[in-house]
Amino acid sequence: MDIKDLGGLGAYAPIFEELYKDMAQPAARNIGLALGAITSIGLFLHLLSSWSTDRLNICLKKNLDEYAERMKDVPPEDVSEVPPEIGVPIIEKLSYVTNEELRKLYIELLAKASIKDENDKAHPNFINIINSLSPDEANLLSYFKKRRQISPNKYIRSTVKKSEFFHIFLSNEKDFINLQFPDNLSSYLENFEGLGIIYMNDSNSAQVKMFEDIENKINREIVRSKTSIQPISLLSHISLNQQRQSMYVTNYGKLFLDAVIESNK
């Protein structure tokens, strides 16, 4: 491979030439175009200057190989320079993150930041969200990519926590994913909500509507009977202790999922 294929990397081109000596030129070329803007950043230079470290060598090379594979079919005119505020922290993570689920998220976010038509999805704070996820939670994202709203047709006691209800409900769904620590599902959902990915809502509006319909029907009959009976108000005598639960992916969550999961996944 000619170093000119990696021209965007300047003096560090030889290191990347070593990284991609067995890789087709389009992949290496796209890496050079996308990462060229961050080669002058101190942390990135430190990582490259530490290239002799075996563990760093193996981990970073494996992750950058996957990034290159993701980018290899992108036309060069569609490749965008990665902003340093996104590229540098991701490269740092890719130097030591080995968990399959987590590194896929970082790599896809880096790829989205590298493609002109996709880089509007690459919000810098998404790196912090990935940093806050466990491998189970990273795996769980794919489920919410496909099911962006869940509204079970069930009433539950108002004393039951939303996360606990959805823990039970999702665990019994046939298409739900396998988790390494399934007992932690309610905690995962609470973390997702805290990160702004999902929102869990409770409502007894359907129950209220049912009583209103009954109330209106009874009062119409009272009017027809022309008796002295006063209209009734069921809701004023009833304590509603059951409610419906719903969970949906927020707009911010949708943008995050689109940024870290390939469109065809």
Image (spheres, helix red, strand yellow):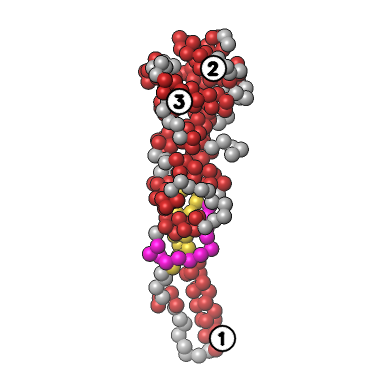
Q: Are marks 2 and 3 in contact (CB under 8 Å)?
A: no
Residue nearer the viewer, 259 or 12: 12
Q: Taking 73 as reference, is 97 left or right?
A: left
Q: What stretch is highlighted in magenta?
A: 149-160
**Percent x, y of residue 65:** 53, 24
The residue pinned by badge 2 equals 20
Residue displayed at 53% across by 43% down: 142
Q: Which amino acid does label 1 sit on?
A: Arg
Camera-near label (1 vs 2) is: 2
Q: Quadrant of the C terminus?
A: top right
Residue displayed at 41% across by 28% down: 96
Q: Tell me if residue 258 can be seen.
A: yes
Question: Label for residue 59?
Answer: 3
**Percent x, y of residue 89:** 41, 27
Is residue 102 covered in magenta? Answer: no
Residue displayed at 54% across by 51% down: 176
Q: Is residue 42 above or below residue 200?
A: above
Label 1 – label 3 distance at C-alpha:
80 Å
Question: Label for residue 224?
Answer: 1
Looking at the rendered structure, the secondary structure element under dot 1 is: helix
Please tell me in which quadrant of the rendered image residue 20 appears: top right
Q: Quadrant of the N terminus?
A: top right
Crowding at dot 2, Cα within 10 Å, few <14 / some 14-19 / many 20+, comes out as many
Camera-near label (1 vs 3) is: 3
**Percent x, y of residue 259:** 51, 35
